[in-house]
Amino acid sequence: MVVYPIITTRHAIGHFMQGNAQTIEQWSRLERVFSFSVSDARKLITCFHEEMKCGLAGQASSLKMIPCYVRRPTGLECGSYLALDLGGTNLRVLAVELDGRGGANISAVSRFVIPEPVMHGSGEALFDFLADGVLLFLEKHGYNLRQNHDLAFTFSFPVEQSAINVGILLNWTKGFTAFGVEGKDVVALLREALVRKNIKNISVTALANDTTGTLMTKSYDDASCDMGVILGTGTNACYSENLHRIPKYSVSDDGEREMVVNLEWGNFDKVEMNGYDQELDRATRNAGLQRMEKMVSGMYLGELARLVILDMIDNGCLLQKKHRYIFEREYSVTTELLSQAAGGEDFLAGFGLENATDHDREAAVRISHIISRRAARIAGTAIAAVVTWMDAGFERHHTVAVDGSLFEKFPGFRTNILHILQELLGDSAEKIALCPAADGSGIGAAIVAAVASGRSGS
């Protein structure tokens, strides 16, 4: 693993000591408002456990704790499945082969960009777009349109499931606003769209989200994997829970002892926001919701940086005031640019500021470190909260499957997660392994369908 250097607060402030007293105080203030101490982390864990308890009991909670009606796989599941993946601005249709020995392979895939009018138009238009994608995939890859195929639907938005193939959309996230969908069963809407498009050979057998899929993908070949985490454009987590710890779920007599639970932790609201967080939140379509997501996920970190840059310009600590207009457009600073800055690249040049001073360039790097470090420490603390909920005494090893560009590509993000785990848990942190689990929304959905169908090899 590549270990990226973490610039401490003392080093960062000292580096800017060459400025005047006001500049020094502004940088010191910025460090303070984005700090997330071990004491803060321990308070968060206590609140997180209380919210988990309430959510599992069906009481008011910012953590929805949604039962997913599926257990972890055994690794013996096998068969061919289609997966339809809707989780962001792109739609994917995939064919997945499971070999029954813990191995999975994507044999075909088609990708479609979802137009803005479809994201914000009618629900019928959105689901017709999904059905069109399925039909184009079948035709492109030579599928027999008379032969039946099972399809797993990856729908990475908050849904209340009442069965493996029934899920009511609670609310849109990730910028979607298509009307006529919230409060409806999204599997039923997809089936209706398939009928409208005269696609008669597809059976939608399972509903999953990318978080559940991430857990299922890794646990297919690693029995110690009991948690899945998304750290990308959005953020979420799921874990394996004992059925008897889910009061709101009526335990069935099918012999199952566990069930995957989707936390929807992006909505966790017991983490304290600073002024920049509040300004960002007020300008969003879902103000007051998804608080943790707005402090952690890739959709918002660049925007947080933009707000900080504007403030530092206004306070005479960065660039010149004549440059302010460059950063006035919302979301013009992307998290990808922030990642480049964290890696030491000159992202200011991309805004036509090739003549920025070394101080300005180093300040941009520092801003990226300050914002991303807090995000990673909050994410790491939430991981610690879930693991200690499952196993307070660390009696076993826990593999945490993680997918997403922040975890995979953002310089120092993974290292900062490991740091807070070590600070919180000491030697017990060695019993937590963070492992990449690519394409949970594709392969993982197929595994969900396989577990639901009970198809296993010998």
Image (cartoon, grey):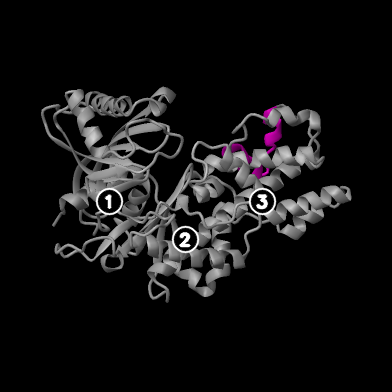
**Which residue corresponds to mark 1?**
103
Nearer to me, 326 or 112: 326
Q: Who comes first in sequence, dot 2 or dot 1? A: 1
Q: Residues within 10 Å of mark 3 (few under 14, many from 20)?
A: many
Q: Residues within 10 Å of mark 2 (few under 14, many from 20)?
A: many
Q: Is residue 42 above or below residue 217?
A: below
Nearer to me, 365 or 71: 71
Residue found at x 65% / y 45%: 276
**What secondary structure predominates along the stretch shown in magenta?**
helix
Q: What's the residue type where badge 1 is placed?
A: Gly
Could you say which disc has been placed on residue 370 in the image?
Answer: 3
* Element type where label 1 sits in the image: loop
Residue found at x 60% / y 64%: 40
Residue 389, quarter of the rendered image: bottom left
Residue 112, quarter of the rendered image: top left
- Residue 410, position as x, y percentages in the image: 56, 46
Could you say which disc has been placed on residue 383 in the image?
Answer: 2
Q: Can the viewer see residue 1?
A: no
Q: Is residue 343 magenta?
A: yes
Q: Who comes first in sequence, dot 2 or dot 3? A: 3
Which residues fall within the magenta stretch?
A: 335-351
- Residue 98, position as x, y percentages in the image: 23, 47
Q: Who comes first in sequence, dot 3 or dot 1? A: 1
